[in-house]
Image (cartoon, grey):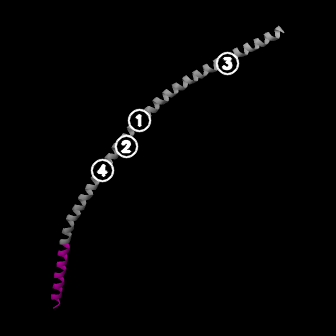
Amino acid sequence: MPANPMESRMARLEGTYEQVSQRLMNIDPRFDGIDRRFDAVDRGFEAVDRRFEAIDLRFDAVDRKIDLLRDAFDKKFDALDAKIETIDAKIDQRFMWMIGMFATTWLTTIASIYIHH
């Protein structure tokens, strides 16, 4: 009699193993589907990475253009600043000449008034 309960337990255990095996076989296709989904997500991230790299290249190109424009502007601004300094020096010189002429005219007028009196 002890063999019979053992056989039933063994049969039940074998049935359980068979059910586990079938369930595991059903899980494998699900994991394959999940793997395919993850692969698709990875491809999506790779596409986004490529887009960001393209955007970075565009920003680099814009930065280079801005640097070129800034350099050209600086050169023109420096040339304009030099011209303004030259004009400022000429204005100062002419102003001094005008002051000298005015002072000379005024002093000679006053001197002639004092000399004639």
Counting residues from the N terminus, which is met first, the one under dot 2 or under dot 3?
2
Q: Which residue is mark 2?
A: 56
Under circle 3, the secondary element is helix
Image quadrant for the N terminus? bottom left
In contact (CB < 8 Å): disc 4 and disc 2: no
Counting residues from the N terminus, which is met first, the one under dot 4 or under dot 2?
4
Counting residues from the N terminus, which is met first, the one under dot 1 or under dot 2?
2
Under circle 4, the secondary element is helix
Residue 83 coordinates in the image, percent (x, y): 54, 22
In contact (CB < 8 Å): disc 1 and disc 3: no
In contact (CB < 8 Å): disc 1 and disc 2: no
Q: Residues within 10 Å of mark 1 (few under 14, many from 20)?
A: few
Looking at the rendering, the stretch of residues picked out in magenta corresponds to 1-21
**Residue drawn where x is 79% and y is 9% of the image:** 112
**Residue drawn where x is 44% and y is 32% of the image:** 69
Q: Mark 1 or 3, which is nearer the eye? A: 3
Residue 77 coordinates in the image, percent (x, y): 51, 28
- Residue type at numbered disc 1: Arg
Under circle 2, the secondary element is helix
The residues bearing labels 3 and 4 have C-alpha atoms spaced at a distance of: 74 Å
The residues bearing labels 1 and 4 have C-alpha atoms spaced at a distance of: 27 Å
Q: Which residue is mark 1?
A: 64
Q: Mark 3 or 4, which is nearer the eye? A: 3
